[in-house]
Each structure stands twice: as structure tokens, then as C-alpha cells.
Image (cartoon, rainbow, N blue to C red):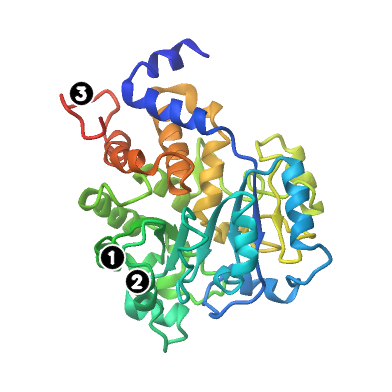
Amino acid sequence: MPRRLDSWLRDPFLGRLYATVRAAGPLRSIAVDLTSVCNLRCTGCYFFAEGMDGRTAEDGPRALGEFIALEKARGTNFVTVVGGEPSLALGRLEALYGAFRLSVATNGLRPIPRAGFEELPIGVSVWGADATDRELRGAGRRDVFARALENYAGDERAFWYYTVAPGCAREVAGVVRRCVDNGNRVLFNFYGDIEERGGALDHRRGFADVRDAIERAIERHPAHVLMTARLAEIVSTGRLFGERWGHSTCTSISPDHPANRRRIENGNPYSRHFRAYNADLATTRRCCTGIDRDCASCFDTWQHFSWVMLNARKHLGSRRRFTEWLTTTYLFYFINRLVDVDEGARLLPEIHRRTRTPVTAPLSESPAWT
């Protein structure tokens, strides 16, 4: 261990986070499309924009039991379950839940029951206040957000995966308040205008106003926002240590996919274990959220978590940078219930304090996280 890292970890708070992550162990993760079917067709959804619903189906050449056995033998210990819509394939979800640690993303229209999924982290999508969410996800007719709030009220498994468009920053405060009042926490995502609607949805206008709104949400709800201001900056700007986000730097790629041959050879870190499986459970695609799309429109927070986490060495230049890496890594484990959830809830306000103010700032005599 480098001498300076050893000195940083004498800080009780940093030492606790580091020990907790080390005890949880390294992740050997994959992403799986559980089904190619969905009960919505959201404007800006990568799954439909690239025709993933028509490329493979869940009755493909590999049975689910065979897939589970192969992945367990390969050492997989964590699965991100995406879509179509996983709540429409509960039998398949239950089989994966019995074999791996999981995280699942859902549109919220149909609740994932507690029975059989007691410890499942559930990311429930929302794309804005009522009118915005209705237009983008409900085809202008369905109040998806209201239904999802009802389905996951007080559900400690659920957090909101809130995708904010550049021109919708003024909606952030109200949406976050409704989620918090519903008894849930909030993780932010950023809208990529892959269908080129333009206007308020155009990611090329930047997310400065959205980041300001997120920072205000952190100030008001430090125990409920699952993204630090620093991570919001990395995701929304696509900048990390002078590198630019894109296919050449993304760490969540399928190494066995031919589209990634040159990417693997460029020397940038990537997860050697990761694969993004289509719904046939046999074929893989380039990355989690793309086949041929321009990565400049990708603001997927999960992939940016990985970008930070796999660039650990670059964060050893200063205590501040190491704190940013460690808190990001811990948040990923906390969100996905890989560490003690009650302790994570106590630590969350201090995580925000450490990443918003100089890490040398004196601690209070009785910090809330103790």
C-alpha cells in the first residue's frame, strides 16, 4: 500500500469506507436483457432506438439454467438486469435472483413483488415532472410517474433513477421532493437525445443548470441523494483526468465482441469479465447501452460509475481525488445493497460533505455517521 494511502486511511471515515468495500470484495459483473418485451416505448430509450427489441428474444438458443451455470462457472457474482421490462418476466428474474446478487431497472408500471425479491435493489425510472414524464414515457396519455410512486411507496428496496433533460432543471426540486416523500432515495441520470428531438431535450446544450439543481437537491436531501456533485460532473461532462468519455474510454464493454477489438488494444482500463448479454442469453453487444450509437449521447450513470471505479490508480494523486474514488465506489456498493444498508444510510450525508468541501475540513466532535 502506498505510504500516502496508508496515511489517508487513518482518517476513521475513509478507513471505514475502504474496509467495507474491501470486505464486500471485487465485482465480476455482467448486464443482461431479461426480455425483449416492454409495456412502454419511451422517447429516447436506447433499447428501442437501436432496435434491440427486434434483434433477439428470450426464447433463444441458450436456456436460462444453462446460462446461469455457465456464468457461475465463469465467476460472475453480480448482474445488472435491464430490459425490455423485467417486471414482465418475473420467473426469469427470480431464477437470476436465486443465483447472483442483482440490481434491476424497471419503468415502475408493474410492481416487482416483495415475496421472493426481499433484498433486490430496484431502480425505478422517472424522466421528469408529470407533464415531461407523461410526454416522454407515457406517449402523452399515461401518468407513469404517479403509478410508479404508488407501486413503490415506502419500499426500502426501491430508489428512483431520475433521468433529467438539459432544459428540465427546474423540475428537479419537485421531482426529488416527491420521491423522498414517497420514502425512497434518488440517483440521477442524464438524458441523451438519441432521437434528435432537440430543444429542451438536446444534450448538446449541456447540463450546467441540471448540475446546479442536483447540488441544491443534495443540500436539501443529503440522506436521500445517491449521487455526489463530483460524479454528476463526470457523467454530464464526460471528462475524467483530461480524458474524454467515449468508446475508447468506456470500461463497460463486452471484450468478446468484435466491435471492441481496437478498444481493447488502446491500453485504457476495462472490465475483462464484463459482458452485455442480449435477451437470447447467448449473443453479446458492444456495451450496455449501445450497438452502433454515438457514445457522445451516452450519459448512463452505471457505466460512468465503472469508469471512475476502474481508474483507481489515477485517483491516488491527492487525498481529494482518492476520496472521490472511494465515495463513488462505496455508493455503487450501497445502492446495490452489497454492503450494510443501514450503515450506508448513516454515512450518506458525510459522503456528500466530504465531496463538496475540502477533505481537510475539521470534523464535528460527534459526526452523524458514527
Quick check: 36 above or below 296?
below
For the point 31% across and 63% down, the residue is 154
Image location of residue 101, percent across then percent down: 57, 48
- Mark 2 nearby-residue class (10 Å; few <14, some 14–19, many ≥20): many
Q: Closer to the camera, 180 or 129?
A: 180
Mark 1 touches mark 2? (CB < 8 Å): yes
CA distance separating discs 3 and 1: 34 Å
Q: Secondary structure at mark 3?
A: loop
Q: Closer to the camera, 178 or 43?
A: 178
Q: Is residue 128 left or right of residue 196?
A: left
Q: Secondary structure at mark 2?
A: helix
Quick check: 150 above or below 352?
below
Residue linked to disc 3: 362
Q: Which amino acid does the dot numbered 3 rest on? A: Pro
Earlier sequence position, callout 3 versus callout 1: 1
Q: Which amino acid does the dot numbered 1 rest on? A: Asn
Image location of residue 306, percent across then percent down: 56, 43
Residue linked to disc 2: 149
**What is the quadrant of residue 128 in the picture?**
bottom left
For the point 53% across and 59% down, the residue is 104
Earlier sequence position, callout 1 versus callout 2: 2
Image location of residue 318, percent across then percent down: 42, 23
Q: Is residue 318 left or right of residue 80?
A: left
Q: Which amino acid does the dot numbered 2 rest on? A: Leu
Residue linked to disc 1: 182
